[in-house]
Amino acid sequence: MMSNFFLQEPDYLHEELDKLHNSLHDFSQEFNNSSQEFNDFLQELDFLQKFNDSLQKSDNSLQEFDLQELDLQKEFDNSLQELDLQRSNNYPQELGDYPKDCIILYKEKNRSFTYRIIKEGIYPLASAL
């Protein structure tokens, strides 16, 4: 009975085999496409990882730069404080300690300054003048 069917429809097996072959071919194509998409995704993921690493290095460099800048700022502030201390040590601390019409002579490298006290009293630090 079954053999009669195949004898009556001789192309049936060929048609079914062709359908199966086409289905397998389509599946293979889709698999290859999916595989290519997956490879593309992996490449994008790799690129994003490299980009993330680059951002991390940039962030680390910026943090190091900020720390160096902070150290330089502290060093600069300290040098200004030392300079202020040196200047305040060169100037008389209280001008009111001197008698009326006293002349104060202060010398720096290649320069000299003369201050005259006009009247007795408490005066601010000379470094504030």
Image (spheres, grey):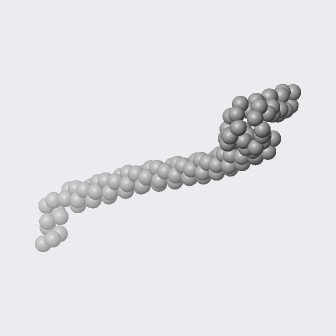
Residue 41 pos. (x, y %): 43, 52
Q: Residue at x 46, y 50 (%)?
A: 44
Q: Residue at x 52, y 52 (%)?
A: 52
Q: Is residue 92 left or right of residue 52?
A: right
Residue 18 pos. (x, y %): 27, 55
Q: How many marks?
A: 0
Quadrant of the rendering where the N terminus is positioned: bottom left
Q: Residue at x 34, y 54 (%)?
A: 30
Q: Is residue 5 left or right of residue 39?
A: left
Residue 38 pos. (x, y %): 42, 55
Tell me which corner region of the image, top left, top right, bottom left or bottom right, holds residue 94.
top right
Q: Is residue 57 above or below residue 4?
A: above
- Name the foreground residue: 91 vs 54: 91
- Name the foreground residue: 26 vs 22: 26
Say if residue 122 shows up in the picture.
yes
- Name the foreground residue: 104 vs 17: 104
Q: Which residue, as the protein is rendered here, is positioned at the far right? A: 110
Q: Is residue 114 left or right of residue 56?
A: right
